[in-house]
Amino acid sequence: MKKLKVLLASASAAVLTACGGVDVQTYADQKPALDLPVFFDGTLDAWGIFQKRNGELVRRFHVEIIASWESPTKGQLDEYFTYADGEKQRRVWTLIQQPDGTWRGTADDVKGEAIGKVAGNALHWTYVLQLPVDGKVYDVNFDDWMWQLDENTMMNRSVMSKFGFDLGEVSLFFKKRTQP
């Protein structure tokens, strides 16, 4: 009986988490209007942290992003991560805008596709990242929000979860490199 109660409580938490949240249209009037091929063009730097759900800072990192577009609706983000402990990773995103205006993204460590919607200055992505931890790979859900602050700056906040339970958050600050 105790196991059943725990299972029902877990299922309830997962349902409540799935029902909540902000609609990206909330930001429809916010400026500057985010145009992915314009913002993510050229070389960008990002600095980020990962915090456990209790707020403990676990990792710090820098990302160099080389962004290019073969058309206004298809681009690539080549990301080079360097963590404070010296670990390095690379992720290459392919982004394709759909006829309905949504964006689809793929990367080698993303299960299926990331699905994103833009409204005003905001992008809301959802996807499953295959995250390696201690020699195992876990499928982790990302609820990923980006807000463009000005023509060269963006903030990003991602909530990571599994089975409806928050695991932690990733926060990033993006800055476009300006041309001399």
Image: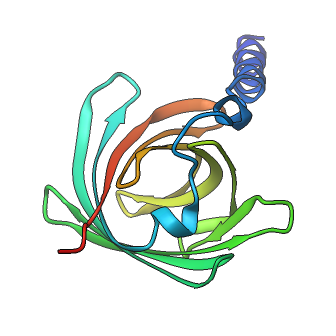
Q: Residue furthest bottom?
A: 70
Position of 146 with respect to 16 (left or right) is left
Out of 84 and 115, give the one closest to the viewer: 115
Out of 177 and 84, give the one closest to the viewer: 177
Looking at the picture, does residue 34 appear above or below residue 11?
Answer: below
Residue 52, horizontal then vertical, whole percent = 36, 32
Q: Determine the residue positioned at 69% across, 76% down.
A: 73
Looking at the picture, does residue 110 appear above or below residue 116?
Answer: below
Q: In which quadrant will I find the C terminus?
A: bottom left
Residue 78, horizontal then vertical, whole percent = 42, 77
Q: Residue furthest left?
A: 85
Out of 168 and 105, give the one closest to the viewer: 105
Q: Determine the residue positioned at 46% across, 67% down.
A: 40
Q: How many marks?
A: 0
Q: In which quadrant will I find the N terminus?
A: top right
Q: Residue furthest right?
A: 100
Residue 39, horizontal then vertical, whole percent = 47, 62
Picture quadrant of residue 49: top left
Picture quadrant of residue 53: top left
Position of 14 with respect to 135 (left or right) is right
Looking at the picture, does residue 10 appear above or below residue 33?
Answer: above
Position of 53 with respect to 165 (left or right) is left
Position of 5 with respect to 153 (left or right) is right
Q: Determine the residue positioned at 58% across, 35% down.
A: 30
Looking at the picture, does residue 123 appear above or below residue 54?
Answer: below
